Amino acid sequence: MKKHIFIITSLFLAISLSSFSQVIKPVKWSFSSRRISSSEAELIFRADILDKWHVYSPYTPDGGPLPMVFNFEKSTEYSLSGKVSESKKPQVEYDDVFNVNTLFFTKQVTFSQKVKLAGDSGQTIKGSIEYQACIEGKCIPDATDFIIKVDKFSNQDKSQVVPAPVIGQGDTLAGQTKLTADTSEKTVASPAAGNNGKPEEGKSMWALFWLAFGGGLLAILTPCIFPMIPMTVSFFLGSGGKKHKTYIQAGVFGISIILIYTLLGLIVSLAHAGADFGTVLSTHWIPNLIFFVLFLIFALSFFGLFEIILPGNIGNKTDSLAEKGGAIGAFFMALTLVIVSFACTGPIIGAILVAAAHGVSIQPIIGMLGYSIAFALPFTLFALFPSAMKKMPRSGGWLNVIKVVMAFIMLALSFKFISNIDQTYHLNMMSREAFIAIWVAIFTLTGFYLLGMFQLPHDSKTERIGVYRMLFAVASIAFAVYLFTGFTGNSLKSLSMFLPPPDEKEMTVVSSSEQGEYPGICGKAKYSEYLHLSNGLKGYFDYKEGLACAQQQNKPVLLYFKGHACTNCKVMDAKVVSDPAILDIIRNKYVVIALYCDERNELPQNEWVTSTFDKKVKKTIGQVNIDYQITRFQTNTQPFYATLDKNGNLTGQPVGYTDDIPTFTKFLRDGVTSSQK
């Protein structure tokens, strides 16, 4: 039974971590053969395993984790002789989940299989290896195909070692001479790291969960949802059943809401088709335009211009099924609530899913889990404790006020999608000043609305302004004033994740003693007519060009993977890289190479690259850069910083997003020190 549970769990993790497994290949396989005699050969399978990962032995005891399995295509030209052998003894560790001793390998292990051949001529043997790679309790089921050539037998009994193609390795940079220098650096498999090089995924997961949880609480305070709480609870209390049955129904109702929304998150996770899914979603004009239109439509609907109504037959069908009662009725009651509430919750759910889709695949599931728990909480609690409903405020005009405020917020956020298109395609239609002006107007109007200075179609007559409403009005107007300071020189660092970046051409004006061609150190940089660095830095946007300058200047390289629509990149530039001490180190000690991973300008055909990761041809600057990041560093997240010596060799552990200035300062200083050794 435990093994079945483990298999199901592993499969679920495999699905939900699909993007993660596409970017990181924990095991690198290589294959060869050795001729033993005229009728026998030995197939050799070498596994190089990333640090801290492990794979299980083919001879893992029954009842334990899934063992490694070698599959060979059936053929009349050869037959297996004996079993797969291992080059070393596996590590043994008792697992209290399976109650067995598990057998596993770390770092490196070689397996071999003897085969008897039909003749002394050469053979080609095909098959696959199924296994799971695990780290800290998480496992990724994986498989690799092999094609091994066995050469014709030689009387000198020479050992033949013939490398064979490996499907889906994606962990070397072979063949990408367009980007790389002739280096011998060790490939580092490192997800983007934050403080002290530790992965930030756990931190971001919790941040997303609580953000989504807050979105679920906000959704409850909409006119579509709040009035349904007493009506829904009365469904359970009025069923005539015993108290314990009411509790069971309420529990099923709450769990059903969570399952329905989490299933939506799972569907988005499955849509993470490829390592650059988040980049495409955040930069391509089609999804950004769709999100802009959807947010605008919902905002206008919330303002009262029209009402969004779903087809009545959908809600009616689920509502009729809810009348059956029992656990099934509770489930369909939950489904009815989800469907009916979409007219108000759609933009909140959409915002959570958009935010989640920029991380690893499991994030949409985490986002919907947090949202659904908060959304289901009041319904379930009031069903369990109905007397508490007496203290609940009654529905009224205040609900429409919340709805209108949400409309203003959605209207403001909709321009973020237009800004993404503008930055990525260099349209120069939405400047930073224009964006700030729009937000100043929106949040000023929000404050005036809360003060009762004007009303909208569905508003009740405002006779007096409550304390809380007045405080929110003051906060909104104060925020608008803060935004206005962006016109007078304030960098608005706290809002850098939302605002377009400052015009870097204006920020990079140098003194007369430093006059030269912006922004390179050794001369004008390729693509500098439309790509720029932040904080007045000078550097390059092409790897080979920047590396050549580093060799000329005898300086190390700060390699920086970033994006036009990368929120954390903007935050890092505004809050961390802008620190005077950090800027001083970068300016004086490094040659900066900034590789934009979402730049859509197409390269000349002679600069196209065929990826060793997914075998696809990369034609744009961004596609080539992100493919380089994946194949060399096994990560596709931005921002991502790496320090290299002048020959392109890695000099330290790369780091990703961090808001800790001392940590980033140490990272830069260590890179300089290591490059001098």
Image (tube, rainbow, N blue to C red):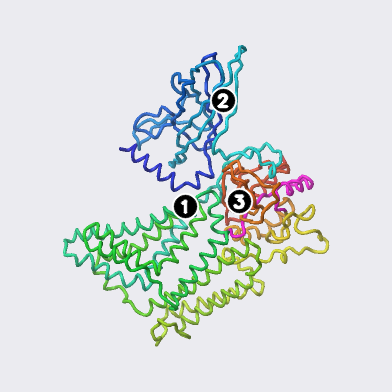
- Residue mark closest to the camera, 3 vs 2: 2
- Residue mark closest to the camera, 3 vs 1: 1
Disc 3 secondary structure class: strand
**Amino acid marked by disc 2:** Lys
Q: Nearest the camera: 148 or 402?
A: 148
Disc 2 secondary structure class: strand
Label 1 belongs to which residue?
271
**Going by the image, does 349 lie left or right of 486?**
left
In the image, which disc is placed on residue 640? Answer: 3
Q: CA distance from mark 3 to mark 1?
A: 24 Å
Q: Is residue 556 within the magenta segment?
A: yes
Please give the name of the residue rendered at 73% of the width and 57% of the height, measured from the top-left corner.
Answer: 538
**Amino acid marked by disc 3:** Phe
Contact? badges 3 and 2 (CB < 8 Å): no
Label 2 belongs to which residue?
149
Please give the name of the residue rendered at 18% of the width and 61% of the height, measured from the top-left corner.
Answer: 243
- Residue mark closest to the camera, 2 vs 1: 2
